[in-house]
Image (cartoon, rainbow, N blue to C red):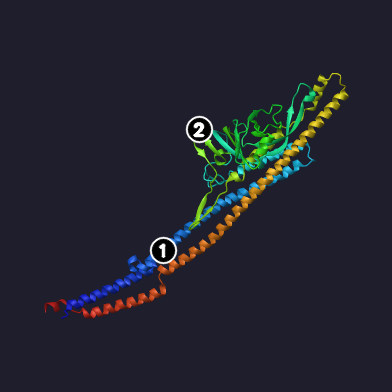
Amino acid sequence: MRVTASMTTSGTLLDINRNVSRLDGIERRIAASKNILRPSDDPIIAARALKFRSNVAEAEQYQKNIEQGLSWMDTTDRAFFNVVDILDKIRVLANQGATGTNAYASRKAIADDVEQLAAQLGKEMNATYVGRYVFSGFRTDEPLVFERGDSKEYLIEQAFYESDVETTKALQRVVGPMANDDRLKMSDVNILKMAYANSGAPTVSISSGGLVVTPTVTEKSLAAADVYEAFEATPVDYAVTFIKETGELVLGDNAKDFLEGGVMTVRYEKNGFLEGDLNPIVNFRCRDLQTGLTYNMDDHNLEYEFAVNTRVGVNTLGKDVYTDKLHANLRAFVNFVKNVAITDEKWLKTKFAQENPSFTEEQVNAAVHKKLADEKQRAEKSLRDRFNNLIGVIGESFSSASARQADLGARMDRLNVMSNRIKSDIINFKELLSSNEDIDIAEAGIELSVARAAYDASLQVGAKVMRLTLADYIR
């Protein structure tokens, strides 16, 4: 085959263009610091790069989840620290009030301190993280404890067990037609405390040993002389007395005995809530009577995904820490202590003198002294019992809060370990990504020198091959 001058020129120009293209590609890769500029340059490197980038993005997202989870849990832990501290202070006060060396007036002062701590306890249970309540499960827009009054109406269901029954001394003023009938009466009673005072009359059922009984519920006012009487009814009665002003259920002996090993379900309507009351929708099974919506807090754990197929709960349900039993006992304790009042001495002297005109002043003073001493003795005995009961409730709550705080700490430790591993994974993936797609500058420099030399040589050869002029073609 005859090779013409134009073919030689075309071939030379093609080679020069190839060298230019190769040189340009190397320079562009060096400028971008990448082995390839487009997937077609090397499909294998491109596929690996996509995989490594996906791994890095996934690990970085998991790391963000861990950071958010730890922040949520850290807020919860700080609230726990305050809650445990408050419970410990209440326990110390309860121990002080339970000792025999504290007089009636001192115990009332201690109760005032308990009331303030109880109010602060409710505020701690409304701890928030970026505007969301950390103790309310899925319903992060709802506080555990009402921060202001609420006019809603709910049908609420509470469950009580044998361990919830408080056997204590109830103190009640009995006023009769004679001075001697105006006294403080003390009774041994079995009490269950509902979460709210001034609710509607409840319906009660007790399930135990495969049997279900429906006790007779009688509503009585605190003004009734026998409101705290211990009932010894026949087995068919299973009497329960409901005291609306305090939200207490006084159990007859048969009802208490039947509850052993079983559960008592109490349903009642509550209309209107005060600041500091428990929020029903994040504490109980309930139904909003205005909207018809039902709520159930049985399983409200918030879980974040921190690795493939690895989910960890980041929250703690407040109802398991600040329980309805603790709330009701603190409220009832404060109300009970505040309402214990000793008869005024001057008024009592006047009353004794009027009703016993034959008494001398000495006899009146003696009678008043005896009556007041009896009242104080009964009051202090009843108060000691209430303080002792509070010690038990606080001790149980303190142990429960400490256990849940320890569980939270264990989960935080687990996340910290996972965080360290994921940080290491991110570094490893980025190193693999770099080694896969980042250019080796030294090697690229050599390659660039070779390409530049080839290009220069092609130009020199071309200059020699393409010395023909226009005159050569005319000839």
The tag on residue 51 is 1
Q: Secondary structure at mark 1?
A: helix
Going from N to C along the chain, the mark reached first, 1 or 2, is 1
> How many numbered marks does the figure carry?
2
Rendering coords of residue 284 (x, y %): 57, 40
Q: Quadrant of residue 92?
A: top right
Tag 2 residue = 290
Disc 1 residue type (three-letter):
Lys
Report whether residue 347 is seen: no
Q: Nearer the viewer, residue 143 or 291?
A: 291
Rendering coords of residue 35 (x, y %): 38, 69
Q: Secondary structure at mark 2?
A: loop
Q: Residue at position x 39%, y 63% from top?
A: 50
Q: Quadrant of residue 249?
A: top right
Q: Furthest residue to the left?
A: 475
Q: Quadrant of the C terminus?
A: bottom left
